[in-house]
């Protein structure tokens, strides 16, 4: 046994070498005994516990991100639905006014209010979309900083991008 404290990388490398019976490349290899010295099990256990805690923390962060994204998508859909309803109501009122040939101030005012509501809903939808993109970018930075491969980042943020694209195409209709 040794008094040396092993780094996480050395522990992982040593365990990998042991699994392949490749003692010569093991960080625990000692020429004087022509074999590996033991890695203290408490160091291995400590590494496993730290990595498990880090994984749990990341899973919680991913869950929170997914909840936020889901809520923002729901809000965006609700704003879009409001836009569609307001636009339909404006068109209905304009058509009604044209049919009866009346353009009195009260009806005109109602149309103006609905148009303002439509513009407000549009601007709120744009704001929510910008916040959603900002959160996606921040999560991607965190994942990359933590060393996750790009494919993992793409997999995690891909479904949200697909939802946004679907909503964009719905808005264009």
Image (spheres, rainbow, N blue to C red):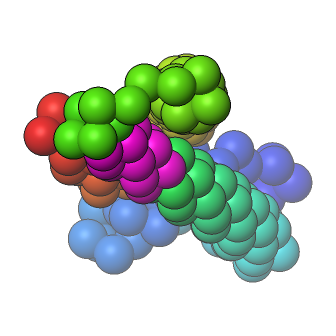
Residue 72 position (above or below residue 125): below
Residue nearest the viewer, comparing 129 with 60:
129
Q: Residue at x 38, y 42 (%)?
A: 93
Q: Quadrant of residue 28?
A: bottom right
Q: Tell me residue 140's x, y (percent).
A: 48, 33
- Which range is magenta? 80-96
Residue 115 position (above or below residue 34): above
Q: Is residue 86 magenta?
A: yes
Q: Residue at x 29, y 41 (%)?
A: 100
Q: How many numbered badges does the structure rendering display?
A: 0
Q: Residue at x 81, y 48 (%)?
A: 4
Q: Is residue 162 magenta?
A: no
Q: Residue at x 72, y 49 (%)?
A: 6
Q: Tell me residue 40's x, y (percent).
A: 76, 71
> Does residue 168 appear to the left or right of 126 in the view shown?
left
> Does residue 41 appear to the left or right of 127 in the view shown?
right
Q: Quadrant of residue 98?
A: top left
Residue 12 position (above or below residue 8): below
Instruction: Give the main secondary structure of the magenta stretch.
Output: helix
Q: Tell me residue 135's x, y (percent).
A: 59, 33
For the C terminus, the image quarter is top left
For the N terminus, the image quarter is bottom right
Residue 107 in view, yes or no:
yes
Residue nearest the viewer, comparing 128 with 42:
128
Q: Quadrant of residue 46?
A: bottom right
Residue 157 in view, yes or no:
no
Residue nearest the viewer, comparing 110 with 63:
110
Residue nearest the viewer, comparing 59 with 169:
169
> Does residue 36 appear to the left or right of 98 in the view shown?
right
């Amino acid at each position: 046994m040794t008094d040396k404290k092993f780094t996480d990388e050395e522990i992982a490398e040593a365990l990998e070498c042991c699994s392949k019976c490749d003692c010569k490349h093991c960080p625990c290899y000692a020429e004087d005994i022509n074999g590996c010295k033991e890695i203290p099990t408490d160091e291995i256990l400590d590494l496993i516990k730290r990595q498990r805690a880090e994984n749990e923390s990341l899973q919680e962060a991913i869950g929170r991100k997914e909840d936020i994204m889901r809520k923002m998508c729901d809000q965006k859909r609700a704003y879009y639905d409001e836009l569609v309803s307001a636009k339909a109501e404006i068109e209905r009122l304009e058509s009604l006014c044209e049919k009866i040939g009346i353009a009195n101030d009260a009806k005109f005012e109602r149309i103006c209010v609905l148009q303002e509501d439509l513009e407000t809903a549009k601007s709120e939808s744009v704001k929510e979309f910008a916040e959603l993109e900002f959160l996606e970018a921040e999560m991607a930075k965190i994942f990359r900083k933590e060393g996750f491969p790009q494919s993992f980042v793409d997999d995690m943020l891909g479904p949200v991008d697909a939802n946004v694209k679907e909503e964009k195409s719905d808005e264009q209709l």
